Image (spheres, helix red, strand yellow):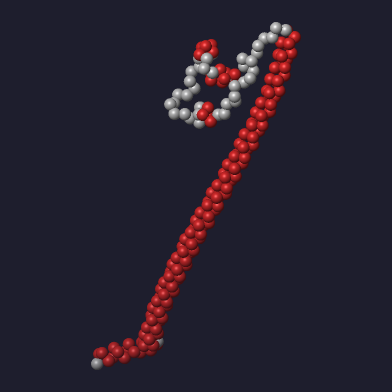
Amino acid sequence: MAISRWLLRSANPRILQLLPHHRSLSTTSSPSHHNDHHRNHQYHSPNDYLNSWNPPKDPKEARSKLSWLRRDYAMKMKAVRKEYIQEMELQRLEKQRKDEIKKEALRIEGEERKAAKAAAKKAKAAERQVAQEEFRQTLLKERAEKLEYHKMRENKIMEKKKEKNELLRRQSSIWIDEPELEGKILDAIVASTM
């Protein structure tokens, strides 16, 4: 990967002709966060290995030089891999930290939403209770009015009965018993004939 980057940055047009042509990954003229990383990416300096091999005359020396180059390359690759693993671990920890922050924010938001719902429920319950109390008071008032009306009606009926009974009592005081009635009728007839 580093070699291909170096080859692309090199000014040798012959090397660029040998590489397969790739189409551009960007379809927009303005850079996006996906393809804009090359602006802030820090490239390594050109590698010492490239174009550094001069074949020696002696095969033994060539073998030892090649084995030294391989050992040095393996050590450097081990360091690069270690650095890469550390970077990945740091990125994982950073992602985990961000996820925990987001989770905590969501939890707090959920608690606030639940508290708001509970407050709304309490307010509705209080309104409902006030409305029920008003309704109950209205019913009690109506019942009291009906009861008062019925009592008044009963009192009027009782008064009418009393008046009727009083009238009957007064009229009954003028009434005459049956044996006396016959005598009175005879007296009235005799008085009218005379």
For residue 142, say whether it is visible: yes
Residue at 64 percent of width and 15 percent of height: 52
Residue at the (50%, 31%) spot, across then down = 33
Seen in the picture, residue 131 relative to 46 is either above or below; the reply is: below
| Residue 121 percent coordinates (x, y) | 52, 54
Nearest the viewer among 133 and 22 is 22
Q: Nearer the viewer, residue 172 or 44?
A: 44
Residue under the image location 46 percent in, 62 percent down? 135
Quarter of the picture containing the C terminus is bottom left
Q: Residue furthest front?
A: 57
> Which quadrant holds residue 70?
top right
Res 176 visible:
no
Give above or below for 123 relative to 49.
below
Which residue is drawn at the image coordinates 61% and 36% (left, top)? 95
User: Looking at the picture, does residue 189 appear above or below residue 12?
Assistant: below
Is 7 on the left or on the right of 58, as rendered?
A: left
Foreground pick, 172 / 170: 170
Position in image of residue 113 (x %, y %): 54, 49
162 or 129: nearer the viewer: 129
Spot occupied by residue 118 in the image (x, y as percentages of width and height):
54, 53
As drawn, is 179 to the left or to the right of 102?
Answer: left
